[in-house]
């Protein structure tokens, strides 16, 4: 009887030790697998940065169009091939491949094209950047930047401004186009000189 008890205790102890070893081996191996690095730390940091940027940059839209009437009563249409808003400031829309059309009350039309743009959907202000082309009546204008202020009723065109007109050609640093008065103020920042070749007759 004692012999049988000893064998039983021995078998139970052996099974207990085997069970503990199996449990230890299973969890130890699992922890080792979890601790193994699947991607490098640099790649992990880059992914975290991209995810953070995506949270800030907001939603991306394609082939969008805004239309409205400015404070002067002029109608406009603003189009973009690609645009995204900013989660930090929902009023600002960043755009790529931009096209704007202004329909003035005197039945004239002004067209603007640019590589990039920014539209404020609250103030209705617009910025055009990179290879800006403006077409108004018989004049064509090229520059790096243009900005439309709804409150002031001005279009400001700056940086490497070149105007081609049926009356001639002009190079300037900055132009201020008053939409209400239909006047053009030409400014030069360097040496106070404006390069112009104009036909007087």
Image (cartoon, rainbow, N blue to C red):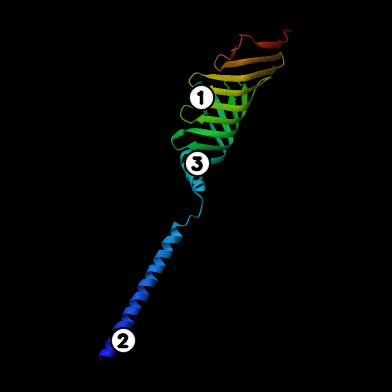
* First reached walking from the N terminus: tag 2 or tag 3: 2
Q: Residue 129: x, y in percent? A: 58, 27
Q: Is residue 57 above or below residue 201?
A: below
Give the label on residue 59, or none. Answer: 3
Give left or right: position of 12 versus 191: left
The residue carrying pointer 3 sits among few (fewer than 14), some (14 to 19) or many (20 or more) residues within 10 Å by Cα, namely: few
Q: CA distance from mark 2 to mark 1?
A: 98 Å
Q: Which residue is mark 1?
A: 70
Q: Considering the image in quadrants, where does the N terminus appear?
A: bottom left
Q: Give the residue at x 53% y 33%.
A: 94
Residue at horizontal 61 percent and vertical 16 percent from the top: 173
Residue 7's mark? 2
Q: Are marks 2 and 1 in contact (CB under 8 Å)?
A: no
| Residue 100 lies in quadrant | top right
Nearer to the camera, 35 or 156: 35
x 65%, y 10%: residue? 194
Say whether residue 76 is left or right of residue 138. Answer: left
């Amino acid at each position: 009887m004692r012999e049988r008890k000893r064998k039983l205790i021995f078998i139970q102890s052996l099974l207990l030790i085997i069970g503990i070893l199996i449990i230890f081996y299973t969890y130890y191996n699992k922890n080792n697998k979890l601790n193994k690095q699947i991607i490098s730390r640099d790649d992990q940091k880059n992914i975290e940065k991209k995810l953070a940027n995506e949270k800030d940059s907001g939603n991306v839209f394609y082939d969008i169009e805004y239309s409205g009437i400015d404070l002067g009563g002029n109608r406009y249409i603003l189009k973009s091939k690609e645009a995204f808003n900013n989660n930090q400031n929902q009023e600002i829309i960043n755009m790529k491949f931009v096209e704007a059309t202004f329909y003035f009350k005197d039945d004239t039309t002004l067209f603007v094209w640019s590589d990039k743009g920014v539209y404020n959907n609250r103030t209705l202000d617009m910025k055009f950047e990179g290879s800006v082309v403006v077409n108004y009546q018989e004049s064509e204008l090229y520059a790096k930047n243009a900005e439309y202020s709804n409150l002031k009723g001005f279009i400001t065109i700056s940086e490497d401004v070149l105007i081609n007109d049926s009356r001639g050609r002009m190079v300037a640093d900055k132009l201020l186009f008053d939409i209400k008065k239909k006047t053009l103020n030409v400014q030069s920042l360097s040496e106070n000189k404006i390069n112009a070749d104009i036909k007087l007759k």
